Amino acid sequence: MTTTTQALTRQMLEWIAVRPRDYSEIMETWRTSCPRLSIWEDACIDGLIDHEQGTGKVVLSASGREFLNRLNLR
């Protein structure tokens, strides 16, 4: 992961960590037309996000929380 993508991934995960988000809200905020900056897709592939039981809202997975914790320790 490059410094740029890591910073954007961190920003997105911190934003999701504030409260569970609707998928549509995430797509409105984080969609991109640049295939080199597929932050949402990469976070999904890396298992950093999950869906809240019952509501289907997007939340951080355990891996997503670990990712943020590792970055915050630096």
Image: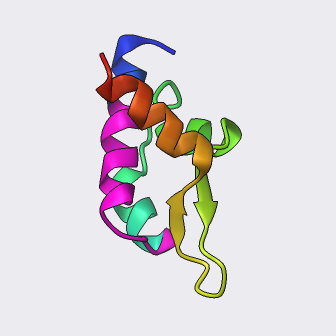
Residue 50 position by quadrant: bottom right
> Where in the figure is residue 38, as x and y percent of width and height?
52, 35
Q: Is residue 28 left or right of residue 55?
A: left
Give the quadrant of the C terminus.
top left
- What residue do we see at 61% from left, 79% from top? 56
> Does residue 9 belong to the magenta stretch?
yes
Residue 62, position as x, y percentages in the image:
60, 48
The residue lying at 35 percent from left, 69 percent from top is 19
Colour scheme of the picture? rainbow
Above or below, 22 relative to 28 = below
Q: Identify the residue at horizontal 46%, vertical 30% (top origin).
A: 37
How would you classify the magenta stretch by its main secondary structure? helix
Q: Is residue 12 above or below residue 69?
A: below
- Is residue 20 part of the magenta span, yes or no? yes
Residue positioned 34% across, 32% down in the render: 8
Query: Among all residues in the image, which is located at the extreme top?
Result: 2
The x and y percentages for residue 67 are 49, 32
Q: Where residue 26 sits in the image (x, y, percent)?
A: 42, 62
63 left or right of 5 in image: right
Apparent side of residue 51 relative to residue 9 in the rendered image (left or right): right
Residues drawn in magenta: 8-23
Q: Nearer the viewer, residue 14 or 35?
A: 14
User: Could one spot residue 38 in this view of the protein?
Assistant: no
Q: Is residue 74 above or below residue 28?
A: above
